[in-house]
Amino acid sequence: MVTDHMLRIEGLSVSYGSRRVLRGVSLEVNSGEVLALIGPNGAGKSTLVRAVSGVIPVEAGCIQFIDPARGSMDLHSLPPMERARTLAVVPQAAVMPPAFSVWETVLLGRTPHLNFLGQVSAKDEDIARLALQKVDALDLSSRRVGDLSGGEQQRVLLARALAQSTPVLLLDEPTSNLDLHYQVSFMETVGTLARSDGLTVLIAVHDLNLAARYASRIALLVAGELKAVGTPCQVLTVELISAAYNLPVQVIQNPFSDTPLVIPGTI
Amino acid sequence: MKIRPFLYTLLFLVLVVVLSIAIGSVFIPPADLGRILVGWMKREALSEPLKTFAFILTDIRLPRTVLVLLSGAALGGSGAAYQGLFRNPLADPYLIGVASGAGLGAVLAMSLKWPYSFWGLMAVPAMAFISALLTVFLVYALARVGRTVPTTNLILAGVAFSSFASALTAWMMLHSTGELHRAIAWLIGGASQAGWGPVLTVLPYLALGLGVLVLSGHALNLLQFGDEQAQQMGLPVTRARALILLAASLTTAAAVAFSGIIGFIGLIVPHVMRLWFGADYRRLLPLSIIGGAGALLLADVFARSVMAPQELPVGIVTAIVGAPFFLWVLRRAKNQGYW
């Protein structure tokens, strides 16, 4: 089911009050691709994800979803319901009502395909079950969200986003609270999904080496401006990274994956 | 959807209704209740003692029972909605000040002209509604810190505003003459207004308010994840919030306008329902409405039988049971961050 749709962000600027957080960011993310958004704290990664998802106002620029079958859609002018059919989000440090079960939570991902009463059909339940299966969390179904570990919660949020059945997936630092094992398995899952389902994935990550290993392309954001976009080899260079993070670094080859491996020096 | 929780809650309500129409200054044995019902259904003439019972039933017990039942339904439903809207287990129309705000509006309307006419009677809930809405916005704005509304702030702002509104209400009542003194008894929460008039007047407000609330379970489920996630899942958050807030405040105002300020039903009932039957608001809302009706009616039966022939205001009964419950919930929420 791979189609060649894409997410196009053009000249995006966002301000919080008088403070400019994003300045003219332009990016394209293709279907089947994982684009990792990296950058130091406060560079605007989360803001970019939130702006694209439509929950904060955009000052200038546009966010388009281009689908050869349906033409291009301006995501910001869509009502929330229709936008949620195009784009799903795995938020950072998400609020989770502890008394909800995992199953109830994932079913809520079906919202944009339901009526306002939220009545689910057998098909919706099948999709939710499949989503839980894809993130290897089907056995958690009856657990309460409040009783889950951080890694389990992240997988549930990913399952909920997948249940939305959208062509575009946004993730905001989904691995920052996970241990090494879950970081790798989470990113593996996301990469596999992008390829097998032709998803367009934009993911904000802190960990450069995780980005290097699992992203098809990387975008480097510094102080609200896009400094570089390209393959991991093109972006994770000594010059770009040491300048962006204000820290001397070395870049070697990752013996597991032949991708760049960034090693921080001392200040 | 699971049917069992509804069966249990409805069974509880039916039992309390039977109690409520049986117990009073004249005890009507349930067997006679049955005979009267059968007689009505068969359209037969009732025997002489049954006739008296039937009169007490239709003109005194039933209207009161229905009014209390409707008020309880309103408090249970709006309590569940406020808890969902504020994502706060301690939100209750009484504790966040909405009930007192509605009471202030109602007394204001009464002090202008005690509702003798039908339209006068309709104006009381309308004023109560407007002043309930103003209260919600005021308390919410006072309690808000950035994008969150901490529990303590919400309760403090609610209690502070509540005292202020109650003081104003008391002052107005002291400076009025005659009829308004009846408002005092009413305000502590005793459904002493007799006859079917109040029931018929309150019905349209409640049907509208509770109708919207029953349909908003899915939206409230989404709102439990915070406004941002709710919108990302497709909910038009601002519109949904406004609609639910309007409906909950209308419901509270209608209950206050006809039964006075009754605390804690809106806190206890949704809480118990959540504990027993889960957090899904599509289920929680109707269950809180039915459960609220039963709970307030039970409190009312107790209030009029414990010191018979004297009547306790029902608000005293709900407070005596509710305040300790409130403290228990507060401690529990602190210890577990869980509800």
Image (spheres, helix red, strand yellow):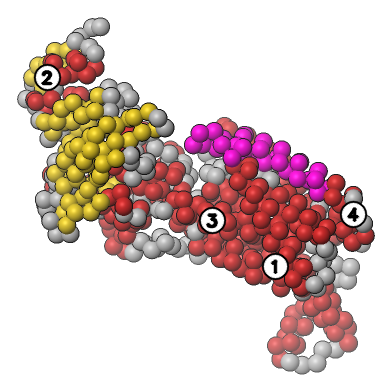
Identify the subunit bearing mark 3: B
**Residue A121 left/right relative to B308:** left
Q: Nearer the viewer, mark 2 or mark 4?
A: 4
Q: CA distance from mark 2 to mark 3?
A: 53 Å
Residue beneath disc 3: B244
Vertical relation: A73 (above or below) A192: below
Q: Are marks 2 and 4 on the same chain?
A: no
- Classify mark 3: residues with Cα within 10 Å, few (<14), some (14-19) or many (20+): many
Identify the subunit bearing mark 2: A
Residue beneath disc 4: B176
Residue beneath disc 1: B202
Mark sitting earlier along the chain (3/4): 4
Quadrant, the N terminus of chain B:
bottom left
- Residue B213 in picture, x, y percent from top left: 55, 60
Which of the labelled discs sits on residue A237, or is there none? 2
- Report the magenta residues as a range: B141-170
Q: Are marks 2 and 3 on the same chain?
A: no
Q: Are marks 2 and 1 on the same chain?
A: no
Vertical relation: A175 (above or below) B134: above
- Residue B90 in picture, x, y percent from top left: 61, 43
Q: Amino acid at mark 2?
A: Thr
